[in-house]
């Protein structure tokens, strides 16, 4: 940002503003119980096998593909991956979320800077319960569910949509997210400055200063947690 002016703030939702309360290990194990399949692998293997965000139109196939990879790695190529995906999805409570560390204070600090919005790649049916659980359903100036759009982040369309709803200049609308590819690159490609915070499932490289190192990406702000938001991001 050339003038260090932030007139509005837009947050990503999953793994940025909020985190899941459900234990990943318990969810993983419950998938096998529901599918009546002898367990194998670890939750981390499944998460690493998943590519990109879930397809809002076919989450079943998305998770089934991940289970296929985990099954192959563990010598179980004939397992019913679709049944495991069904078991996992049936166990997820989309409203079981809490603010990420520093998230509540960051939201309050963002409100002091101007309008506040959420832009998420998920569909409304999956993400709206999270906003309600956080007490934000009526506290936002705009919400964009890119999962219900023809194009999701990192495409410019969702970013342009949220700026249009807010009535703000993209150059003064800060986007805060955990994904370098979808959030940082996507925001900057649409003309928005970006603040990057490593997600809870990430183990980012660390620079000589001990801070998370986003290179080769270049977000305008790097936050170890959202607790740093107020001090790092200038008010207008």
Image (spheres, rainbow, N blue to C red):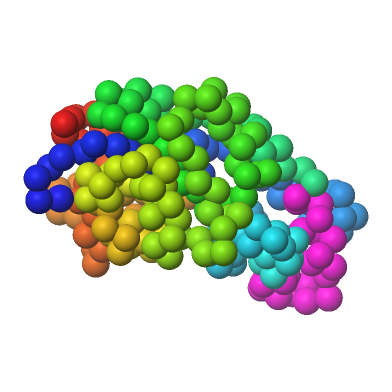
Q: Residue 11 is drawn in which quadrant?
A: top left
Q: Residue at x 85, y 61 (%)?
A: 83
Q: Residue at x 18, y 30 (%)?
A: 235
Q: Along the horizontal axis of the image, is 8 left or right of 71?
A: left
Q: Along the horizontal axis of the image, is 109 left or right of 66?
A: left
Q: Is residue 106 visible?
A: no
Q: Quadrant of the C terminus?
A: top left
Q: Position of residue 48 (x, y in %)?
A: 55, 63
Question: Up-down: is 58 above or below 140?
Answer: below
Q: Position of residue 167 (x, y in %)?
A: 34, 42
Q: Along the horizontal axis of the image, is 97 left or right of 185?
A: right
Question: Up-down: is 185 above or below 134?
Answer: below
The magenta span reads 67-89
Majority secondary structure in the magenta region: helix
Q: Along the horizontal axis of the image, is 223 left or right of 103?
A: left
Residues 188 and 7: in front is 7
Q: Residue at x 43, y 65 (%)?
A: 155
Residues 8 and 39: in front is 8
Q: Is residue 133 visible?
A: yes
In this rendering, the count of numbered labels is 0
Q: Residue at x 22, y 50 (%)?
A: 171
Residue 143 on the magenta span: no
Q: Residue furthest right?
A: 36
Q: Position of residue 4 (x, y in %)?
A: 12, 42
Q: Position of residue 153 (x, y in %)?
A: 45, 60
Q: Residue 109 is drawn in which quadrant?
A: top left
Q: Residue 43 is drawn in which quadrant?
A: bottom right
């Amino acid at each position: 940002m050339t003038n260090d002016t932030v007139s509005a703030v837009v947050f990503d939702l999953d793994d940025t503003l909020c985190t899941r309360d459900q234990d990943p290990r318990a969810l993983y194990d419950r998938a096998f119980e529901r599918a009546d399949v002898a367990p194998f692998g670890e939750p981390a293997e499944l998460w690493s096998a998943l590519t990109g965000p879930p397809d809002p139109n076919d989450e079943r196939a998305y998770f089934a593909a991940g289970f296929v990879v985990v099954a192959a790695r563990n010598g179980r190529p004939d397992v019913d991956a679709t049944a495991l995906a069904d078991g996992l999805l049936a166990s997820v409570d989309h409203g079981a979320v809490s603010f990420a560390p520093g998230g509540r204070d960051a939201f309050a600090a963002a409100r002091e800077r101007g309008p506040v919005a959420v832009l998420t790649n998920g569909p409304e049916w999956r993400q709206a319960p999270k906003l309600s659980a956080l007490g934000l359903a009526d506290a936002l100036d705009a919400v964009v569910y890119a999962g219900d759009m023809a194009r999701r982040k990192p495409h410019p369309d969702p970013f342009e949509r949220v700026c249009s709803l807010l009535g703000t200049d993209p150059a003064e609308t800060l986007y805060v997210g955990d994904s370098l590819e979808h959030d940082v690159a996507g925001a900057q490609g649409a003309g928005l400055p970006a603040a990057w915070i490593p997600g809870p499932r990430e183990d980012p490289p660390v620079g000589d200063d001990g801070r998370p190192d986003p290179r080769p990406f270049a977000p305008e702000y790097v936050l170890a947690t959202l607790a740093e938001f107020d001090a790092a991001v200038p008010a207008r």
